[in-house]
Amino acid sequence: MTNPQRFLSLDVFRGLTVAAMILVNNPGSWEYVYSPLEHAKWHGCTPTDLVFPFFLFAVGNAMSFALKKYETAGNAAVIRKILTRTLLIFIIGLLLNWFPFVKWSDTGELIMKPLDRLRILGVFPRIALCYGLAAFIIHYLKDKGAFLSACIILFVYWFLLLAFGTGDPYSLEGYAGLPLDKWFLGENHMYHGEGVAFDPEGILSTLPATCNVLFGYLAGRFIQEKGKTYEMLARLMIMGCIMIFAALCWNLVLPINKKIWTSSYVLYTVGIALMLLSILMYIVEFQGKTKWTPFFTVFGKNPLFIYVLSGIVVKLYLLIRPAPGQNTYSWLYENIFRPIGGNMNGSLLFALFHVCLFAAVGWWMDKKKIYVRV
């Protein structure tokens, strides 16, 4: 029998993840960022590389509560709900990529941002695709099928990297998903942050990323079934240790890598997520220490909305120019935060300020009982 009780620690985990996403996305200057707040250059995993897979894991947690309510409505209603939510999140991601729809030209005029340069994939589109794929797997194959599917996907993805990669299959140039993205999306619609057309949220790597959602769902189901017991907590921690150990062993032949979302990276990030969740559960559920939690739960109650809002605000900063040749983003850093803390600490203060700013937005929304559901 599924235990209906609610777990505050799951809300804290989700809110902590959203806060971390805002923190790492908004340094005052990208030239001055402490190394733990940067992504690994290629192979490896920094604390920042944990944030996105943690969010997908949290999506799976939430699904473990939500999907069972939809099941009672019948198969057609469940399919309609999954497709609608997937499409809506994907469209929000596309609009966020295009926003604010205009940009400054070389001659200092505002012009429309061309659609033929619009990036199609990204964080929100990946969330949408991973949610949709995971939801259909869970709906049709149930819990055991979801676990088996995750295992199969991870090994099939490894096979695809080896079978269709060129040269070093774990390099950017040899990555099997690169020609697929170029053919299906077109170079103009891909991310160019590496200096070339390469999308770290590409089509092929969305498959293993879906496993983060599936494992998050399975963890949520396990927690609900076992309830607030030390057996549940111990088994959750042990499973986290096993997955980290397995990932480190796999890393010897398949490097842990976020940008191509390797199977070893999935196990590694899920293992750490399980251990962090175990620690949060012990502190919050077993020790009852909850006074510090509201700061994070306000993020967790409106996670997608607050994350979208943070992206909108930053893009408006970059559009609005308080002085010729200087946007609001750089003006705030140069005139407020850098004078206070210097280059590195000022950049960090800028990010922390925005975490607090959106925490205040989340607190106000919670106080007014405003919860935006997608």
Image (spheres, rainbow, N blue to C red):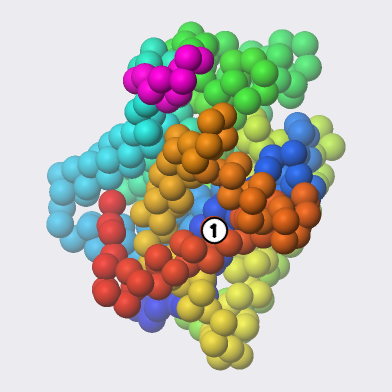
Which residue is nearer to you in this view: 321 or 233?
321
> Which of the two residues, 100 or 371, is positioned nearer the viewer here?
100
Image coordinates for residue 153, horizontal then vertical, percent: 54, 35
Q: Is residue 235 left or right of residue 355?
A: right
- Disc tally is 1
Magenta residues, as a range? 103-112
Q: Nearer the viewer, residue 2 or 54?
A: 54
Residue 293 vertical position relative to residue 199 in the rendered view, above or below? below
Residue 237 belongs to the span the image colors magenta: no
> Within 10 angstroms of label 1, few (less than 14), some, or many (20 or more) residues?
some
Q: Which residue lies at the image location 50% right of the left edge and 50% below the top edge?
A: 56
* Relative to 95, 192 lies left or right: right
Q: Is residue 273 above or below residue 280?
A: above
Residue corresponding to mark 1: 354
Where in the figure is residue 67, as x and y percent of width and height?
30, 57
**Image height of 30 relative to 351, above or below:** above
* Residue 168: percent from left, percent from top: 78, 17
Instruction: Give the residue furthest to the front.
Output: 323
Residue 153 visible in the shown view:
no
Q: Amino acid at mark 1?
A: His
At horizontal 40% and vertical 78% (from top left) the residue drawn is 6
> Residue at point 63% right, 56% down?
336
Look at the image and tell me in which quarter the N terminus lies: bottom left
Instruction: Name the spot of residue 321 as percent of width and height, x first.
Output: 48, 36
Is 107 a magenta residue?
yes
